[in-house]
Amino acid sequence: MLKKAAILFFILFIAGGFFLIPQEHHEGETTTTEHGEIVQTEHGDSHGHSGHGDIGKELPIWSAVPFVGILLSIALFPLLAPKFWHHNFGKISFFWAIAFSLPFLIFYKSAAFYEISHIYLIDYIPFIILLWALYTVSGGILLKGSIKGTPLSNLVILLIGTLLSSWIGTTGSAMLLIRPIIRANAHRKNKVHIVVFFIFLVANIGGSLTPLGDPPLFLGFLHGVSFFWTLKLVPHMAFVSVILLGAFFLLDTFYYKKEEVSSENVVEKDIKREPIRLVGTLNFIFLLGIIIGVLFSGSVKLGETTIFGVHVAYQNLARDFFLVLMGVLSLIFTKKALRKENNFTWFPIQEVAILFAGIFMTIIPALAMLKSGSSGPLGFIVAAVKEPWQYFWVTGGLSSFLDNAPTYLTFFNTALGQFFPGQPESVAVVKLMSQKALYLKAISAGAVFMGAMTYIGNAPNFMVKSIAEENDIQMPSFFGYMVKYSLIFLVPAFIIVTLVFF
């Protein structure tokens, strides 16, 4: 009976989905590029590539309902029906993806096919390949030895992870250090806050200094922002990191003193002291290979090919192949016993891949409406962004719930259009870095910093949460994470950053 009801609900929802898409659709239309140029397209993008036109102007605002649905599913199911969610999250993600894509394809045909192909070929597949490679390689590095989970040692691990994230990526740094910090605090009663601040600092804010750190900055690099320009965010990152590290140390000290059995006694009695050392260091070569692959794709131009109407650069295909190769070599040359000792499993990356497959599908209308600018259904948001602090909060606020990479690119282009309309991107970006640097800093900091606001703000957040739960740490729900932690600790820190820098 339950299955029949579910099937009926599915059919009704899909039928209702047809009303999400307007029935008048033009195969060819005049559209304005991000630099103010008027071009005629036939489901083509603003650069003349076959595909879509400005579809964001045609989509109604309620076409984002499936996106809201998948977000609410991620937020509520683990809280209200955890066992059901654990066994069926893939089906739920698929349900919302179909609920949007089926009517979208029926009404928009080739334009919809282009948009779906584009987001998976350009965004999702490279995104998952990079995450998989970093997850696989870092999972082959084991930090051994007797680390006592004291407030000071935890602070040092968070600081090291924060500094590493800009150079080996937030995913690489997070996957390298999350298991050691969990093991170090295995005896602790209160440790949820440790994982949460780990997400804040290592999985997000620490990645703000180079294009290797976080996907939004890598997109900026691909569009002409100098590799070392983002080092201008050192004061911003240092400022917010000091605030959060200080808050963490005070909170961790409070909980540590409150616990009945001290960490010191547990370590001395139950754990044989061992020197701290790294095992599986060969994987640092593969980690370096990943970094070189990413740098290569942003530094050379090898031409492009067309896949399903989407223009894909050869250097990006080479990068993805090389990243997969690094992961495979790591699996071959790392002993299985080492990964087992490191508590390495595939579930966290599988969960991220499955859930983000649904998120990337359903996010299409929201991003399209934002990219259509002030004339689109979400034009009131874009039109309201004028000052640096507005760029910081709007880019960051949307990055908390949308994918922060395309959100960054949307407001990056908004700034180019606001200050340098009609100018070639190569010229406008140079001027943006020099003449309007404060705006670019605001966009960059907002996209990276506020990815820490929710579990879905950045992919490593979900993986860290999943690994913590595998180790029997009861992480807060989607809303619990926000109410108990990000709103209390992050928002005040970001307000201070705004007053000081923006």
Image (spheres, helix red, strand yellow):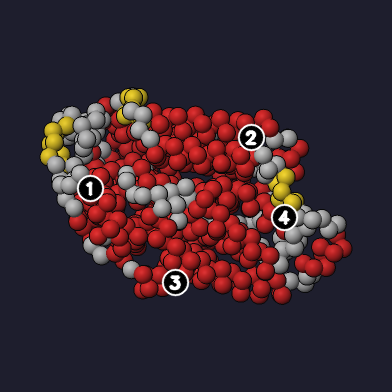
State yes or no: discs 2 and 1 in contact (Cβ < 8 Å). Answer: no
Q: In this orientation, which residue lies closer to the viewer: 484 or 435? A: 435
What residue type is disc 1 on?
Val
Mark 2 or 1, closer to the camera: 1
The residue mark sitting in front, 2 or 3, is: 2
Query: What residue sits 56% from the left and 47% below the top?
Result: 172
Q: CA distance from mark 2 to mark 3?
A: 41 Å
Tell me the SS state at disc 2.
helix
The quarter of the image holding the C terminus is bottom left
Q: Quadrant of residue 491?
A: bottom left
Q: Quadrant of residue 495?
A: bottom left
- Earlier in the chain: of badge 3 and badge 1, it is 1
**Badge 2 amino acid:** Ser
For label 3, the residue is 492
Comparing marks 3 and 1, which lies closer to the viewer? 1
Q: Name the residue beneath numbered marker 4.
A: 183
Q: CA distance from mark 4 to mark 1?
A: 50 Å
Q: Earlier in the sequence, mark 2 or mark 1?
A: 2
Residue 132 lies, in percent from the top left, at 55, 38
Q: Are marks 3 and 4 in contact (CB under 8 Å)?
A: no
Question: Can you identify the residue that label 1 sits on?
Answer: 427
Give residue 330's mark.
2
Q: Quick check: can you spot residue 364?
A: yes
**Which residue is drawn at the image coordinates 18% and 29% (left, top)?**
42
Disc nearer the start of the sequence (3/4): 4
- Assign a secondary structure to mark 4: helix
Does residue 476 appear in this view?
no
